[in-house]
Image (cartoon, rainbow, N blue to C red):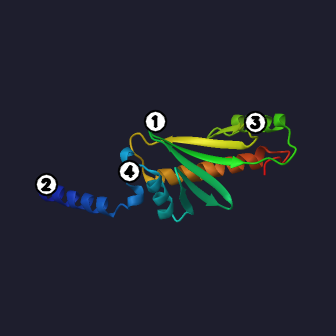
Amino acid sequence: MLHRKILQLALVASIMALSVPAFAQNVGSGDISVAKIEEMFKNAALNATKDGDTVIVEDQSIKVLIRLDEPKKLMTFMLIFGFEDGTPQSERIQLANKLNYEVVFSRFYVSPEGMLYADYSLSYEEGIAPAMVVRAYRWIYKTVTGGIQSYDEKKIVR
């Protein structure tokens, strides 16, 4: 009787493992590539394109760039925004500092060219599930755009 129960549980576990979509299964760190990331987003029905060493995911005309740092096993999500013409550098930096203080999920900085960057790095050292990659994308998109909407009181970000 106990043997039969164990076999039934093993059968149920096998069926469940086979029915788990590839979207939820871990991808090994050695299998992560720009092409694989593009595939993850396309499988999630998101608009993703590969451009050299970058995957670009576009939603509502906002682009999120995703790059790999293979030696460190890091996937970096990056958003880049312009400022209204004539915005002083001091106001740009002040806004980046305010966003860094208020929005804890990502890092904001102003480039030497005067653009506002927001980024977040996700480790894939132990492998990663595609669902986690898409969830991280959605979270950075939501927190960065929401942070700018909330804290750009002078409306200097384009």
> Secondary structure beneath disc 3?
helix
**Residue 6 appears in which quarter of the rendering?**
bottom left
User: Looking at the image, which residue sits at the far bottom?
Assistant: 45
Instruction: Give the Cα separation between the discs numbered 3 and 2.
Output: 62 Å
* Kind of residue at disc 1: Lys
Quadrant where the N terminus sits is bottom left
* Kind of residue at disc 3: Lys
Residue 11 place in picture, x, y as percent? 21, 61
Tell me which numbered mark, 1 or 4, is placed earlier along the sequence: 4
* Kind of residue at disc 4: Val
Which mark's residue is nearer the viewer, 2 or 4? 4
Q: Which mark is residue 94?
A: none
10 Å crowding of disc 1: few (<14), some (14-19), many (20+): few
Which mark's residue is nearer the viewer, 1 or 3? 1
Residue 151 place in picture, x, y as percent? 78, 43
Residue picked out by circle 2: 2
Tell me which numbered mark, 2 or 1, is placed earlier along the sequence: 2
Residue 82 place in picture, x, y as percent? 76, 48
10 Å crowding of disc 4: few (<14), some (14-19), many (20+): some
Tell me if label 1 and label 3 are in contact, CB under 8 Å. Answer: no
Residue picked out by circle 3: 98
Residue picked out by circle 1: 72
Which mark's residue is nearer the viewer, 2 or 1? 1
Instruction: Give the Cα separation between the discs numbered 2 and 4.
Output: 36 Å
10 Å crowding of disc 3: few (<14), some (14-19), many (20+): some
What residue is at 35 percent from the left and 60 percent from the top? 20
> Secondary structure beneath disc 1?
loop
Q: Is residue 20 above or below residue 111?
A: below
Tell me which numbered mark, 2 or 4, is placed earlier along the sequence: 2
